[in-house]
């Protein structure tokens, strides 16, 4: 059995939203794309490559603070897109863009190169295009992110790391509260929400826009 992968928000979001087990369903494809997109933006905020400006209508802007460009192609791709815009665009517009940019496949292909996922391509005589699917190399890898944040909610012994606090908020926002809090002790929700309220303002704004986008998706039926 492989070791649990080093936590990375965008990978964790993909696994939590897209792979089911006996007590956690996968969410609708569009909701998964929104969650993965929010996780990628949060990663770049935490690494200092982009900034969310709540005071300016939650616009996403590049940051010039002397940090090196993202080392991975996924982060570099989004950072360069943000930098290429003449004026900073609102976060909801970026989430919408990421939701239709096949971010799931981009992220899953990246996980294939790191040894976390398998990519399978099937061809059919009846279809011109091949069908591509992705699966974790081990079920333990698929379960690791949710298991990790549930351990925080069960022990409630210390402050969660900032990326895990955002991941808890993201998991709730995409509609997986039942799986998140199943069989956790009394007070787990309050513990989690105290962390959400303590998120830095840019991540709070990002979480709010994610929750709004998921709600709008449910209302319109655009799943």
Image (cartoon, helix red, strand yellow):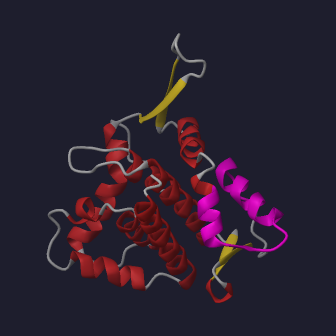
Magenta stretch holds residue 147: no
Above-or-below relation of 2 to 122: below
Viewer-proximal residue among 204 and 71: 204
Left/right of residue 101 with respect to residue 144 in the rendered view: right
Q: Write the residue at 47% across / 54% down.
A: 222
Viewer-proximal residue among 80 and 212: 212
In the displayed image of the protein, which residue is found farthest to the top?
Answer: 125
In the displayed image of the protein, which residue is found farthest to the front?
Answer: 220
Q: Write the residue at 28% across / 65% down.
A: 177
Q: Write the residue at 48% across / 52% down.
A: 30
Above-or-below relation of 218 to 65: above
Name the quadrant containing residue 113: top right
Residue 142 in sight here: yes
At which x and y percent is residue 64? 79, 74
At which x and y percent is residue 87? 81, 74
Left/right of residue 53 with respect to residue 171 in the rendered view: right
Magenta part of the chain: 69-97
Left/right of residue 183 with respect to residue 129 in the rendered view: left
In the displayed image of the protein, which residue is found farthest to the right?
Answer: 86
Residue 9 in sight here: no
At which x and y percent is residue 132? 52, 28
Viewer-proximal residue among 105 and 162: 105
At which x and y percent is residue 22? 21, 44
Judged by its main secondary structure, the magenta piece is helix
The mark total stands at 0
Name the quadrant containing residue 127: top right
Q: The N terminus appears in which quarter of the rendering?
A: top left
Q: Write the residue at 19% across / 80% down.
A: 187
Magenta stretch holds residue 77: yes
């Amino acid at each position: 059995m492989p070791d649990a992968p080093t936590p990375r928000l965008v990978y964790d979001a993909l696994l939590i939203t897209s792979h089911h087990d006996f007590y956690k369903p996968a969410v609708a494809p569009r909701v998964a794309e929104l969650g993965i997109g929010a996780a990628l933006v949060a990663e770049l905020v935490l690494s200092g490559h982009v900034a969310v400006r709540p005071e300016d209508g939650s616009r996403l802007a590049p940051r010039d603070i002397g940090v090196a460009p993202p080392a991975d192609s996924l982060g570099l791709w989004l950072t360069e897109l943000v930098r290429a815009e003449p004026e900073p665009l609102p976060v909801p517009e970026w989430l919408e863009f990421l939701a239709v940019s096949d971010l799931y496949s981009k992220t899953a292909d990246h996980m294939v190169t790191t040894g976390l996922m398998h990519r399978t391509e099937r061809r059919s005589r009846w279809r011109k295009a091949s069908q591509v699917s992705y699966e974790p190399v081990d079920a333990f890898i698929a379960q690791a992110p949710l298991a990790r944040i549930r351990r925080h909610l069960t022990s409630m012994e210390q402050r969660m790391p900032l990326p895990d606090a955002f991941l808890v908020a993201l998991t709730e926002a995409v509609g997986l509260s039942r799986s998140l809090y199943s069989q956790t002790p009394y007070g787990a929700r309050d513990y989690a929400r105290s962390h959400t309220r303590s998120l830095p303002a840019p991540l709070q704004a990002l979480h709010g826009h994610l929750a709004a986008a998921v709600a709008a998706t449910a209302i319109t039926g655009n799943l």
